[in-house]
Image (cartoon, rainbow, N blue to C red):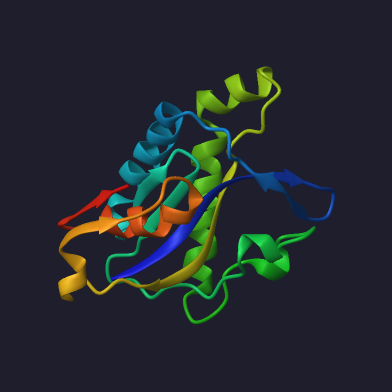
Amino acid sequence: EPIARADPVALVAGRDDVLLRGRVDDLSLADAQAFIARLNVHFADDGLVFVAARADTWFVHLNGLAPPQTTPLLQVRGSIHAHLPRGAQAGQWKRWLSEMQMLLHDDPRNAAREREGRLPVTAIWLADAGMANASSSAAQGTWFAPAGREGDVARGLAAQGPVSVAP
């Protein structure tokens, strides 16, 4: 099953383009879960399922959908236009990204974040898509992953199936 990183980010609309302001990495677990729940309700019929390995590290399970061709977030500078999804299904992925932006823009948590001087979560940046093989013996039992970002991929993959993750 395809899975991709789904980083919460802040975008800024310029006069002629949209710029990446930055990755939002100061979310509380409650806020992350609320954002993810909102996304999951909206995209339930499309086959997208969002999960959080930690409050600031999200993944999306693509449930049989072809993964988009993307640019890793660390490579994006300035305008996002050249870094949007590419490939056969690019139009669909761009539409979904726009829907994500509209859902997140209207979320009251973002207004509170801005009042507190923190970046709002205004978009999701999809990247690093790949396949998770749920039929392998490694996809069952207990996986071990270090705390922090080093173990995020293992925790994100484990969220899809009969796997537990221990420190």
Residue 106 placed where, x, y %? 53, 31
Say which of 47 and 144 sits in front: 144
Q: Is residue 103 left or right of residue 123?
A: left
What count of labels does the image hold? Answer: 0
Is residue 156 in view? yes
- Name the residue: 44% across, 35% down: 32
Locate residue 85: give its quadrant: bottom right
Q: Is residue 138 left or right of residue 78?
A: left
Q: Is residue 148 or residue 110 the one in the foreground?
A: 148
Residue drawn at 70 percent across, 66 percent down: 75
Q: Is residue 160 visible?
A: no
Residue 5, image x, y percentages: 47, 59
Residue 67, compared with residue 142, is above or below; it is: below
Residue 101 picture quarter:
top right
Q: Residue at x 47, y 46 (%)?
A: 148
In the orientation shown, which residue stands out farthest toward the right?
15
Q: Is residue 99 above or below residue 116?
A: below
Pick the residue in front: 141 or 20. Answer: 141
Q: Position of residue 104 (x, y in %)?
A: 52, 38
x and y percentages locating residue 65 in the rendered image = 34, 71
Location of the N terminus (image quadrant): bottom left
